[in-house]
Amino acid sequence: MPDLRIENLSFTYAGSPDPVLRSIHLTIPEGQFVLVTGPSGGGKSTLALALTGLVPSRIAGHMRGGVYLGANDISGMEIHEASQNIGIVFQNPDNQLIQLTVEEEVAFGPENLGLPRSEIARRVEQALIYTGMEKMRREQIYALSGGQKKRVAISATLAMLPQVLVLDEPTSDLDPVGTQEVLSVLRTLNKQYSMTIVLVEHKVDEVISWVDRVLLMDQGKVIVDSPPRKAFDDFSRWTRVGVSIPQMVQVAGALPDLFQGSTPLSVDEVYEVLHGTPYAQALIQRNEIIQGTDGHMPVSPAVQSILRWEGVDLAYGAKQVLNEVNLKILREEWVAVIGANGSGKTSMASLAMGFQAPTKGTVRFRDQIVQAGRISRQAENIAYLFQAADNMLFGATVEKEFLFGFKYQRQRRADKDKEVAVTIDRLIEMIDLTKHRDDNPFHLSHGQRKRLAIGVLLTRQPEVLILDEPTTGQDEGHARAFFQFLLYLRENAKYTYMMITHEMRAVASYASRVVVLRDGRVFMDGTPEFIFARKDELALCGILPPPIALLHGRLCEGRARRVDLRVDAFLRSLQQVEVTS
Amino acid sequence: MIIDFFTHNLIGRTILGYFLIFSVATIVSIKIVKLIGFKGLRHLFSYEPKQTVIHGLDPRLKVTYPVLIGILSIFLNWDFVYYLVGFTLIPWMFLRPSPARSRVIITMAGVPVIGAIWSQGLFHTEGNSIQHLIVIFPWTLSWLGTPGLSYTGLLYGVQQSGRTLAGVLAALILLFTTTPSEVVWAFYMFRLPATAGLAFSAALRFLPQMLERMTVLLQVVQVRGYDLTVPRRRDLGAWPGYIKRVFVCIPVVTIPLLIGALRNTSVMAMVVDARAFGSHNERSTLKEHETTLADGIALGALAAVTLAVILLVVLHIGNRLI
């Protein structure tokens, strides 16, 4: 198969003064697995579109240079011709599924290629097995969860067996085990068929051990281009653009005497080095000291639950989504709800907001039963940040967004007697958008828009914030800034958070409690340090702990009751060990 | 005395006239909301996954069916068009749609019928004659351009709506029981451009997707505190505020909806291209429809109806008077 060459490629979107790609010059040899990462707005997705010929043929703008697959100029080809060589999986699964059932969707591409029926059947079967969707082949697509739809989208492209496969954030809606499964499939295709794979992804930690080459992009340029073990020779190039160094690389960097300049990329590699050292032995000793605790947070009887699910079932026809859910969320908790795709996380949250009614049981805010359909009433108590926060903004300026809320929102009974406690000035200041007060919300950065969406929800002075996948589509730097903002809000206004996420490092860093769902039931419930120590049970729920937690667990020979969740905490544990030894 | 007031007094006749003109439109609108609601509309043009004999029929038959029924209904007069309506009810007996969908079907088939009959009743004219009018409107209603409620107009409406009903009932069978890939296959087998089949099925998916997106947007505005809770009937003071809020909400919801729809369409076009649609003249399929006895019976029934209509028209028994 030929090489993929990008020659002096620049692209400027129509109406934009600045180019989004600036003189990119690369050659990707046949069969290479390439990670493209970097901050949002750095040009990654545009590069992906250019590799498939969609830029410039379907996206308006000015392009210089070209993309070639061997001698073929991809930029000059018809898309349906280019698509037989280069396949793409887009970011949003909802926009790229055009058929009614899983099987029909995956078969659509091979059918268009006019392949024999037996070959179409073989490809459909294989593609569905690769993504773990073979049991759902007859399911209706609209009934699938976001992550399941993503798997179907990947299967549909895999079934085309392209020479080059470009994937724009293919794992953003997937659970951690699903992410690893998809990466494993991509690696298999890459090895077995010499398929060239270009993966645009923010999850560097999860992806790094699978790839052959890393491209770090910023402001339309490639600023790092090297094999993964060389990519982190200079940490500052990564931290400067807000992309975190993989946890295992950080550990190796902090223990130079043991790693001697090598760059491990996986937990296995770090384990091999640390195993049997005094560090590991002392971690085991430390683990034995804390055997007595059980991971359940001590709850004072005085602390009232703010949200309660009491014997809740939810079914869509014959499909049972939630099954006898009993759960209490206490005031000022930061509860992370995690689980595999389709385990019922969003459904559980939607019941609390009154988007729908449970088929059995009740959901309560304090002692009041949540009435389905009375959403604006429930919004007085609970704010719901949708996954696509952009859908929540309607105003022409930041200030008008707040005015919309104050002008049209349902009047609280309590507000009639007292002056409204929050003011626009205070809220805009709180979300750090004072300088952008008169700006159009859609001229703000992604992170700023997310903050604005939260800010307008705060006009209702809610007590609980439900955050549905709050970091999807955000690069790491922006996600971190967003979580810091949430921390600041929580410390100042004593909010309770219920966060649905697949981002385990965020759970490890910020959540005070973790609830794990499995097939619509509450399967585990406890503090993150204890929950992430139970990796085998978590695997049943599609969850993989963060690498540092996995390493801690392995070094303790699987007997750890609790694990460190952050690299700095883990390294501190090792330093304490050094002192004691 | 009351009858006298409404038939001979100018004020009474004016009130009756306004009532006749606007009551049906109002009742029909309320019935739509009551029977199916906003969320029920998503069932309108969407496939209903079931294992029935109608679902298993050859997609080519199902694509042909509404076209044929539509054509046949044009040639028949109203004495016979309702026999055709009766024929179009037969597949529904096999289909046995869910209660939610049945409500949608009844509403969506019934509303145009009632609307057509009533509008013809109001606006049908026969020169300067007033013999056909059941109710003659007073001069106070002359600005509406209708002399009154016409008997022949109502009859004409019944005849016209028979045609509408036959077409709607046949078209809904296609929509409820045929997947997009089956439609594309049928178009391909008819040597029609597969693009037309894809465009047709994409259009069918457009409305349910749009309604789903609208549901999310309505949830969003309410999450932001916008009160769309319907007031109690007796709470008369709350209704003006509610109606105002509904009107204010329309641009808030529709503008992002339209922008989103256009954006989705553009991505969908890219996806279709990226899956090599149109790259080969010959297109194959994962599934090939195997002709069954049911196909034979359905084809026979359609052929018999077509033949019967041709005979009725040729023999001047049931042809439409133009």
Image: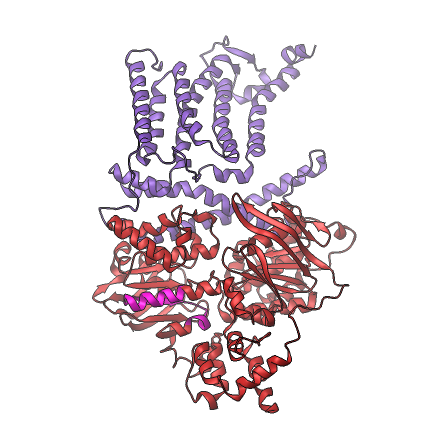
Chain colours: A red, B purple
Q: Up-down: is A7 above or below B177? A: below
In the displayed structure, would residue B139 be above or below residue A508?
above
Q: Residue at x 35, y 15 (%)?
A: B320
Question: Residue A65, can we see it?
Answer: no
Q: Which residues are magenta?
A: A182-207
| Residue closer to the observer: B61 or A402 | B61
Residue nearest the observer in this picture, A71 or A218: A71
Is residue A315 visible in the rendered image? The answer is: yes
State yes or no: residue B3 in magenta.
Answer: no
Work out whether B135 lies above or below B34: above
What is the x, y in percent for residue A429? 64, 66
> Who is closer to the viewer here, A449 or A516?
A516
Q: Which residue: 42% across, 36% down?
A: B176
A69 displayed left or right of A251: left
User: What x and y, as percent, mark residue A291?
Assistant: 63, 76
Q: Residue furthest right?
A: A417
Which percent across, then down, holds residue A296? 66, 68
The image quarter in which residue A204 lies: bottom left
Please name the residue shown 42% across and 82% down the image.
A263
> Residue extending furthest top?
B131
Give the answer, above or below, for where A317 lies relative to A511.
above
B71 sits to left or right of A496: left
Quadrant, the C terminus of chain A: bottom right
Quadrant position of the N terminus of chain A in the picture: bottom left
Nearer to the camera, A225 or A89:
A89
